[in-house]
Image: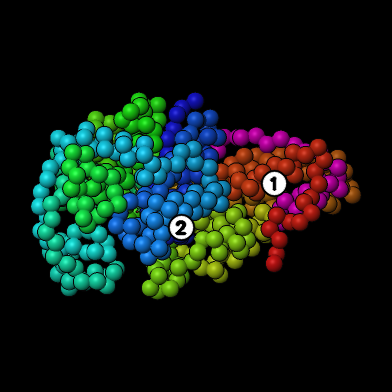
Amino acid sequence: MKNIYITTAIPYVNGNPHLGHAMDYILADVLRRYMMMQGNNVRLQAGTDEHGSKIFKKAADNNMPVKEYVDQNSQKFQDFIHSLGVDYTDFVRTTDADHERRCQQIWEKLSNHIYKSKYEGWYCEGCEGFITDKEYEENEGVCPDHKKPYVKLSEENYYLRISDFKDRIREAIESDEMKITPVFRKKEFLNLLKDMPDVSISRPKESVAWGVPVPGDDSQVMYVWIDALSNYITILGYPEKDISDFWPANTQIVGKDILRFHAGIWPAMLLGLGLPLPKNLLAHGFITVNGEKMSKSIGNVIDPVEILGKHGLVPFRYYFLRHASTTDDADFTWEKYEAAYNELANDLGNLVQRLATLAKKNEIAGQQGELKDLPEFDERMQKYEFNFAFEILWKQIMDLNKRIDEEKPWALAKTDPDKAKAVLVALTKDLLDINQRLVIFIPDTATRIDEIFTAAQIVPPETPLFPKA
Ligand code: MSP
């Protein structure tokens, strides 16, 4: 049994969980279930990113003390993750006292690679980020996301000297010591790495009050990266505890927009701390709606709770795990969602109903499934092509449907009852074999299938698994 550590990005708590956030969790859950099935001891982290002036302002807009606001929103994320059928083993909040203390210790350990410098240039108050002269010119002085003019800023910040580690990071990525999936994003990042500047890791207290104080400098608080990225190891106890049982992480899952921080700044921090790099970084794509980026200004934001409310969790996981690519952008439309639901009902729901009805008529006792070798499935899973792995199982389900049609056990029952029974036992066993892996993707359905087809006597469910509206 191996120890495996899987991590997910920690979302900002300046609003409710949205559809895009679901991707990190369901992908991590699939990987966790797969690795558990192989007998590993898996730890899955999740958490919330709770500092920064945006969150501070949002709390004020809501007339709430900021701590109360982040407590409430962090809880919403925890409930959301559970509603996706995902069990994490560790939940980290960046406002946890343990995290804050450890994060300050990490800062101190990195002090050889941290220097203070004055930033003078353009700044976007909406992005809370520095803007290069080139970006300023390209966007004609106005932030395209926030529609706000950039402002001139002159302030003192601490910087992390990324340049100390660039060569080592490049080598680790090129050799797949820290493997980035998909490969096109690895290439994209290696191009970026060349010009990656040192990164600002603090802000003056007067501009960002809600943050972890910089040790030894009352005038500054940490800004984003040291505080947020360190969550992956502070939750394991670093630096107060030995984390070598679970670190390096096997897989860190992030969205494509934050891959560069995880492939650049994070490894720089780890190298500065003398810690090994994660073995894999998996970058997933974005969920779009009707082909467009979800955005409040377009007004096309879909609440995941609405989707979950429509047909429950199974179709949600089915849609985003079978019909969305693990690594490319994936589109959601209600029409496609309904079509996917019908597929579930026709391909799997009907199979269960038909087979259980025939089994009951022919008095077939429950059977046991077996986890048979399926190398092409493992290959897809190891390459993080979860949708293709799921596809292999779906093909097996379709094959079972075909076999029922061809072998016609209902006709056989009249002419050769023993043969009919043998056919039904074989079909039941095969369904239970598929079910051993179906549990990775749609665990609730797999549990139902197990209950029905391993019972002393097989009986069809009173309501079909996926009732038609
Ligand atoms: N707080 C940072 C992450 C720090 S990790 C040390 C952050 N938060 S976020 O709330 O903006 O995003 C959280 C996760 O959701 C990221 O992995 C991000 O890529 C993902 N997504 C946000 N919008 C998304 C979609 N529309 N589609 C898929 N994933 C998306 O970044």
The chosen color scheme is: rainbow
The correct choice, above or below, for 333 with respect to 378 in the image is below
Q: Nearer the viewer, residue 148 or 345?
A: 148
Q: Quadrant of residue 335?
A: bottom right
Tell me which amino acid carries mark 2: Pro
Is the C terminus in the top left, top right, bottom left or bottom right quadrant? bottom right
Nearest to the observer: residue 79 or residue 35: 79
Q: With 238 as the anchor, is 344 left or right in this view?
A: right
Real-space Cα separation, disc 1 to disc 2, in angstroms: 29 Å
Q: What residue range appears in magenta?
A: 350-376
**Which residue in the structure is indicated by mark 2?**
17
Q: Which residue is mark 1?
A: 448
Crowding around mark 1 (Cα neighbors within 10 Å: few <14, some 14 to 19, many 20+) is: few
The location of residue 130, given as percent across then percent down, is 19, 59
In this rendering, is residue 52 above or below 161? below
User: Is residue 253 found left or right of 422 in the rendered image?
Assistant: left
Q: Residue at the spot x=22%, y=57% of the render?
A: 207
